[in-house]
């Protein structure tokens, strides 16, 4: 199942969380968590986190076909989906009906060549479209074009925060004045319409020769800050305007990836190593944060309960989950994910527990395998 989110039953010993701030390489580190694989069996169930679930079947017509969801967001009661295959940004109402879409591939004004990422500034009513090696387009929240910046920067993820726009370049070569060729985190000042250059972060030295390793999105929002994370780092960075600090750092003991690893090995080699890598799918709400990683050749999903100061090392499916989609966007009220129709039918074929779930049976009875994805909203317990 290509998009199904499988939670592995993970075993860890949690050594603890150090909350005293410290500095390394002039970067503030606010919180350090020591997480060592061991014998602990603490896990949490969907029903421990969420009290209800809502699903939205997206309208399907010949002009509304979604094949490859790159990003998924919900703002002001609208569902926004970036489809990589069709290079289209779709906006749906909460009943699943299409409100509008943007599909402007081309080389001219108001067009884009390769739509890579998008973000929404809800406070100022702006929608940003990032086209790698091309431009940043700005629209209002009804999809109407406002302006564009011809920045021609390579990157794989994009986020807005205040008057600043952030681009995660990954290993795309960019030539920025006063800096080396590869710039992993770039800052664009929208108010001044200038590229301010590269933001510093401690993990820089680990990425000199690596090949591309895809991550679903290198950014997530929390309050007035933007969280930033990379697949071969143990740190969650926090960005606010042009400042950077490490909000959360994770210590995996002997499984920590050495800073010099990519001097001798590639990302193909790391898949057979025992190191912790592939930090991905980070999200944060006022109650929790969560992320996934590979450690000792196993896939783990880790969730931290802020109020209880407790780390859970696995999330178990139960009656409220019944299909466990990848959680792509999270607010303080809900977690949001999606599944392709074909994946839902695969679950129906192979999971007896899902087939016996009343809501799942209702979803399957209303659709075909050629329909658009279903979006799920899991509402946190109050």
Image (cartoon, rainbow, N blue to C red):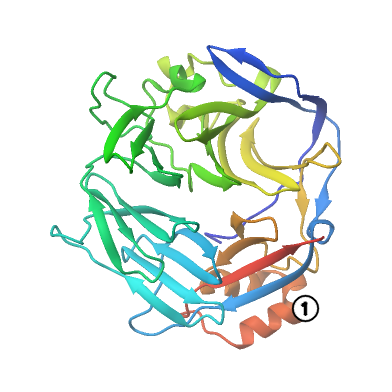
Q: Position of residue 82 (x, y in %)?
A: 41, 62
Does residue 216 appear left or right of residue 9 in this picture?
left
- At x 50%, y 57%, the residue is 123
* Image coordinates for residue 143, horizontal then vertical, percent: 35, 69
- 153 or 120, which is in the foreground? 120
Residue 138, image quadrant: bottom left
**Which residue is at a point 51% across and 15% down the rendered structure image?**
259
Residue 327 location, x and y as percent?
A: 61, 56
Location of residue 33 with respect to 348 vertically, above or below:
above
Q: Is the residue 80 above or below the residue 128 in the image?
A: below
For the point 52% across and 80% down, which residue is it? Answer: 96
The percent position of residue 48, horizontal first and vertical second, equals 84, 57
Residue farthest to the bottom? 366
Label 1: element kind: loop
- Pointer 1 residue: 356
**Which image quadrant is residue 354 in?**
bottom right
**Does 75 appear above or below 308?**
below
**Image quadrant containing the C terminus:** bottom right
Asked if residue 32 can be seen in this view, the reply is yes
């Amino acid at each position: 199942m290509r998009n199904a989110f499988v939670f592995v039953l993970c075993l860890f010993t949690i050594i603890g969380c150090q909350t005293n701030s410290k500095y390394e390489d002039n970067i503030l580190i606010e919180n350090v968590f020591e997480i060592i694989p061991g014998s602990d069996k603490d896990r949490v169930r969907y029903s421990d986190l969420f009290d209800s679930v809502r699903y939205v079947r997206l309208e399907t017509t010949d002009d509304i076909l979604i094949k490859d969801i790159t990003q998924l967001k919900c703002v002001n009661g609208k569902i926004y989906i970036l489809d990589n295959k069709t290079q289209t940004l779709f906006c749906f109402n909460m009943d699943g009906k299409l409100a509008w879409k943007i599909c402007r591939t081309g080389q001219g004004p108001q067009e884009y060549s390769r739509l890579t990422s998008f973000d929404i500034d809800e406070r100022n009513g702006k929608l940003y479209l990032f086209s790698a090696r091309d431009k940043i387009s700005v629209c209002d929240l009804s999809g109407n074009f406002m302006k564009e910046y011809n920045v021609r920067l390579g990157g794989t993820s994009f986020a807005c925060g205040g008057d600043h726009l952030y681009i995660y370049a990954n290993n795309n070569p960019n030539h920025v004045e006063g800096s080396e060729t590869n710039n992993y985190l770039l800052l664009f000042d929208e108010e001044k319409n200038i590229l301010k250059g590269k933001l510093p972060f401690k993990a820089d030295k680990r990425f000199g020769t690596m090949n591309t390793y895809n991550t679903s999105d290198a950014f997530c929002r929390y309050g007035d800050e933007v969280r930033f994370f990379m697949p071969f780092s143990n740190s969650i960075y926090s960005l606010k305007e042009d400042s950077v600090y490490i909000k959360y750092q994770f210590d995996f003991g002997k499984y920590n990836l050495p800073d010099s690893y990519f001097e001798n090995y590639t990302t193909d080699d790391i898949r057979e190593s025992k190191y912790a890598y592939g930090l991905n799918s980070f999200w944060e709400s006022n109650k929790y944060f969560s992320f996934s990683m590979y450690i000792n050749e196993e896939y783990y999903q880790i969730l931290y309960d802020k109020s209880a100061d407790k780390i859970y090392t696995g999330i178990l499916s139960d009656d409220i989950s019944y299909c466990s989609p990848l959680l792509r966007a999270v607010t303080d009220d809900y977690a949001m994910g999606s599944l392709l129709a074909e994946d839902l039918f695969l679950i129906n074929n192979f999971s007896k527990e899902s087939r016996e779930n009343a809501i799942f049976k209702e979803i399957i009875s209303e659709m075909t395998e050629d329909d658009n994805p279903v979006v799920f909203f899991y509402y946190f317990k109050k």
